[in-house]
Image (tube, rainbow, N blue to C red):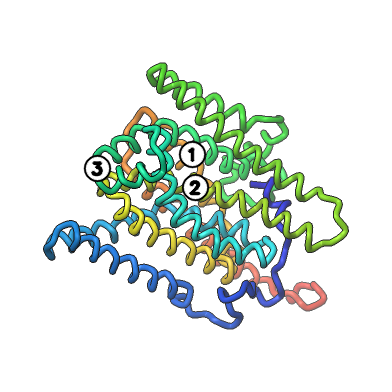
């Protein structure tokens, strides 16, 4: 993600306070405050789910069943998207405050309603050659057929999302300017390979080719075409950032705003790619569009809250390898999405792999911080920099 890193404009003050309006306030240390809005949103979604369940089933048993599905979907979305929160925080910590606020307001609206409702409807409308109204009617009146169309589009979704996420992950590791390494024996050679122009594109294109050989000719064409669009989308967002960053305008605020727009677009595409597996996997629990939207919307709100907490509390700075763990999880998710075009891989495995990388990175960060603290205690220094003996 080194391309976007240069796009963002630093805005952090000495107190580690970020000051986007109505979101973060200096001096607040209570972790629960970050999740207040998410809990309120969850309550509203559960109330809607209860009403929907009662309308659909007419009894308490059916209502409780739908409530349970919504809760499970919310937990599933959080488990699949924690690495998304870390990556969002990585970009947000250097963004212009105005664009931070826009992403955390408009961006979450796009995430909840765009990816969880409009995207599945758009897939159905395109695949079945229906208008938007007809797609909504199909989702409401014939959920079985709606599910069939969505799952039938899985090949294309896997190609696009897998290719885009693979480029995001490789862009982080194939960076010879990256000074901090968690797993040095893996990351240092990868950083050295960044001198080879276009190596990330070559790796992803080879992956698309070899996986396509496992598919039928029709599926292979869909898979490779979608993968190419995923690659082009990544390149386009990176190019947009480079062009806006290089704008020769006189006003710093104008440049910051344009740079923030590029990062905003990057985060939106990234969130969409992360959401693909959650939207498709949700059909294992329910084929009702509105139940899925309520459950995944709850998860999306908690991911937003985690993002805010990670940025304002400086967690990525304090736990140095957390970002690395997130990008390892992204590479793993990309590989799973690409392979899922041929193999069935349960969403539970996807979530566990991401959580494992994040957990190991967190523990490695804690151990590193303790080792540094022990070393500093053993070798205190004077203000002039001379060691006290």
Residue 244: x and y in percent read 76, 49
Horizontal side of 305 relative to 139 (left or right) equals right
Tag 3 or tag 2, which sits nearer the N-term?
3
Give the distance between the C-alpha atoms of the residues marked 1 and 2, in whole angstroms: 8 Å
Q: Nearer the viewer, residue 372 or 30?
A: 30
Horizontal side of 269 relative to 220 (left or right) equals right
Mark 2, secondary structure of its residue? helix
Location of residue 82 by image quarter: bottom left
Please give the residue where the numbered disc 1 appears in the rendered image: 161
Mark 3, secondary structure of its residue? loop
Q: Nearer the viewer, residue 3 or 278?
A: 278
Give the distance between the C-alpha atoms of the residues marked 3 and 1, in whole angstroms: 27 Å
Please give the residue where the numbered disc 3 appears in the rendered image: 142
Please give the residue where the numbered disc 2 appears in the rendered image: 272
Identified at 44% across, 24% down, the residue is 211
Identified at 33% across, 35% down, the residue is 149
Residue 278: x and y in percent read 38, 48
**Circle 3 crowding by C-alpha within 10 Å: few under 14, some 14–19, many from 20:** some
**Circle 1 crowding by C-alpha within 10 Å: few under 14, some 14–19, many from 20:** many
Please state which of the two labelled residues, at mark 2 or mark 3, is closer to the viewer: 3
Identified at 36% across, 27% down, the residue is 342
């Amino acid at each position: 993600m080194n391309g976007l890193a240069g796009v963002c404009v630093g805005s952090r003050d000495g107190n580690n306070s970020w000051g986007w309006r109505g979101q973060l306030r200096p001096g607040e240390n209570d972790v629960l405050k970050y999740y207040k809005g998410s809990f309120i949103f969850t309550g509203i979604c559960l109330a809607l789910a209860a009403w929907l369940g009662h309308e659909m089933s007419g009894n308490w048993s059916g209502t409780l069943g739908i409530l349970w599905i919504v809760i499970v979907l919310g937990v599933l979305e959080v488990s699949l998207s924690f690495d998304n929160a870390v990556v969002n925080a990585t970009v947000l910590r250097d963004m212009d405050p105005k664009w931070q606020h826009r992403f955390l307001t408009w961006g979450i609206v796009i995430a909840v309603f765009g990816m969880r409702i409009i995207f599945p409807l758009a897939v159905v409308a395109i695949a079945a050659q229906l208008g938007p109204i007809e797609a909504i009617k199909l989702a409401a009146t014939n959920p079985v057929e709606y599910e069939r169309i969505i799952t039938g589009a899985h090949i294309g979704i896997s190609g696009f999302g897998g290719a885009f996420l693979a480029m995001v992950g490789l862009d982080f590791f194939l960076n010879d300017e990256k000074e901090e390494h968690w797993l040095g024996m893996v990351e240092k050679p990868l950083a050295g390979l960044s001198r080879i122009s276009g190596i990330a594109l070559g790796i992803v294109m080879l992956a698309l080719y070899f996986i396509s050989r496992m598919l039928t000719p029709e599926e292979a064409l869909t898979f490779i075409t979608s993968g190419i669009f995923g690659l082009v989308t990544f390149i386009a967002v990176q190019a947009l950032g480079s062009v806006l960053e290089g704008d020769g305008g006189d006003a710093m605020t104008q440049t910051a705003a344009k740079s923030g727009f590029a990062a905003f677009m990057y985060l939106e595409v990234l969130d969409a790619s992360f959401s693909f597996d959650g939207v498709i996997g949700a059909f294992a629990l329910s084929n009702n569009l509105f139940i899925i939207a309520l459950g995944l919307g709850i998860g999306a709100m908690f991911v937003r809250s985690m993002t805010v907490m990670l940025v304002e509390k400086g967690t990525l700075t304090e736990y140095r390898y957390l970002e690395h763990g997130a990008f390892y999880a992204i590479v793993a998710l990309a590989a799973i999405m690409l392979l899922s075009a041929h193999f069935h891989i349960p969403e539970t495995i996807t979530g566990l792999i991401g959580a494992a990388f994040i957990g190991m990175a967190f523990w490695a960060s804690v151990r590193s911080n303790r080792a540094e603290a022990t070393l500093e205690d053993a070798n205190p220094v004077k203000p002039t920099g001379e060691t006290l003996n």
